[in-house]
């Protein structure tokens, strides 16, 4: 059994805790416990990188300078983490549209699309508000025969659902090698055949997509807004999340500058999802 590291981070409020969970999930943290004024995060000792953690926490807290009490660290004695995880990991069911379960759960036959997702160290199970809102937004789109980009794929959950909804070509990108490995395992578990997985954090080439899915974070969305427009079909749509509702104005300003029309789709637990379409310029 693996030895784990527990990180304890002081937090000001629930929103800060949500941001930290989202960011830490991308760097290998597998479990979280929320207390009244702190967040406890767990990672295998072999994957622990203090410099990477410090940079992530500072970014999530929007700190420009390091502080002495940014977080505390302690070693956790080995235990059967799979057993502990299975106790807490419950299926996610979105009405009769889709259900997300792990392989050890019973089959859910009352939905249109059933996804088998084992998260391991990657972000995206449907439990977090941002992933749930992405699933809810995808529900209203027609994916049949569409060319789809999943930018920041994590577990591969959105790419897998896109194929199940009829997409014939899905390109899934992520920079995190653990996420890519996890996505490949989940793609295989769902017998998906039209998804390609690549280690990238930006778009290149001349590929054009009908639908772009981007459940990432504020800075990555802002930095790639121009690239998204370049690679989006004239009649295409971008569905995004991973951002807080308070960031709406900043996203809307950048979207307008890049020639997009933006609509807020859903809000949940201080997070929001949105859509972007190219603005039609009248002649």
Image (spheres, grey):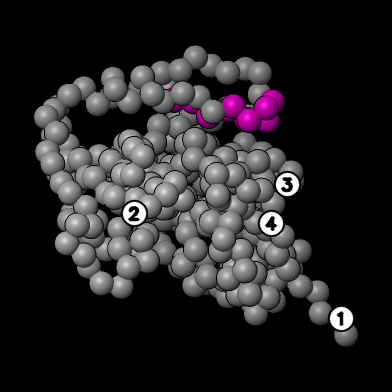
Please identify the quarter of the rendering in which residue 233 is found. bottom right
The x, y position of residue 125, in whole percent, is: 47, 36
Labels 2 and 4: the sequence-earlier one? 2
Return the residue found at the far bottom: 283
Labels 2 and 3: the sequence-earlier one? 3
- Mark 2 or mark 4, which is nearer to you? 4
SS of the residue at dot 4? strand
Q: Residues within 10 Å of mark 1 (few under 14, many from 20)?
A: few
The x, y position of residue 150, in whole percent, is: 53, 53
Labels 2 and 1: the sequence-earlier one? 2
Residue indicated by mark 1: 282
- What range is drawn magenta here? 93-102
Residue indicated by mark 2: 176
Q: Confirm whether the magenta stretch covers residue 156.
A: no
Labels 3 and 4: the sequence-earlier one? 3
Labels 1 and 3: the sequence-earlier one? 3
Q: Quadrant location of the C terminus?
A: bottom right
The x, y position of residue 140, in whole percent, is: 74, 43
Labels 1 and 4: the sequence-earlier one? 4
Q: CA distance from mark 1 to mark 4?
A: 24 Å
Q: CA distance from mark 3 to mark 4?
A: 15 Å
Residue indicated by mark 3: 141
Q: Confirm whether the magenta stretch covers residue 96.
A: yes
- Compared to residue 58, the image places residue 279 above or below, namely below
């Amino acid at each position: 059994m693996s030895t784990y590291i527990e990180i304890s981070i002081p937090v000001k409020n629930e929103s800060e805790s949500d941001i930290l969970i989202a960011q830490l999930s991308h760097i290998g943290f597998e479990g979280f416990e929320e207390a009244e004024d702190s967040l406890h995060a767990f990672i295998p000792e072999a994957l622990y990188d203090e410099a990477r953690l410090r940079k992530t926490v500072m970014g999530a807290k929007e700190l420009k300078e390091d502080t002495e009490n940014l977080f505390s660290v302690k070693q956790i004695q080995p235990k059967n983490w799979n057993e502990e995880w299975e106790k807490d990991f419950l299926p996610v069911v979105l009405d009769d549209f889709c259900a997300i379960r792990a392989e050890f759960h019973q089959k859910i036959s009352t939905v249109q699309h059933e996804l088998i997702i084992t998260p391991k160290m990657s972000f995206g199970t449907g439990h977090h508000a941002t992933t749930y809102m992405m699933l809810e937004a995808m529900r209203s789109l027609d994916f049949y025969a569409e060319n789809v980009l999943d930018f920041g794929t994590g577990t591969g959950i959105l790419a897998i659902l896109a194929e199940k909804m009829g997409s014939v070509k899905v390109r899934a990108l992520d920079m995190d090698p653990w996420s890519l490995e996890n996505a490949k395992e989940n793609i295989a578990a769902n017998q998906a055949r039209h998804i390609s997985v690549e280690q990238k954090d930006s778009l290149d080439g001349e590929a054009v997509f009908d639908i772009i899915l981007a459940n990432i974070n504020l800075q990555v969305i802002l930095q790639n807004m121009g690239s998204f427009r370049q690679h989006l079909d004239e009649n295409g749509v971008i569905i995004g999340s991973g951002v807080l509702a308070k960031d709406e104005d900043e996203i809307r300003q950048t979207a307008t500058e890049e020639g997009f029309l933006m609509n807020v789709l859903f809000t949940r637990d201080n997070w929001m999802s949105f859509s972007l379409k190219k603005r039609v310029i009248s002649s």
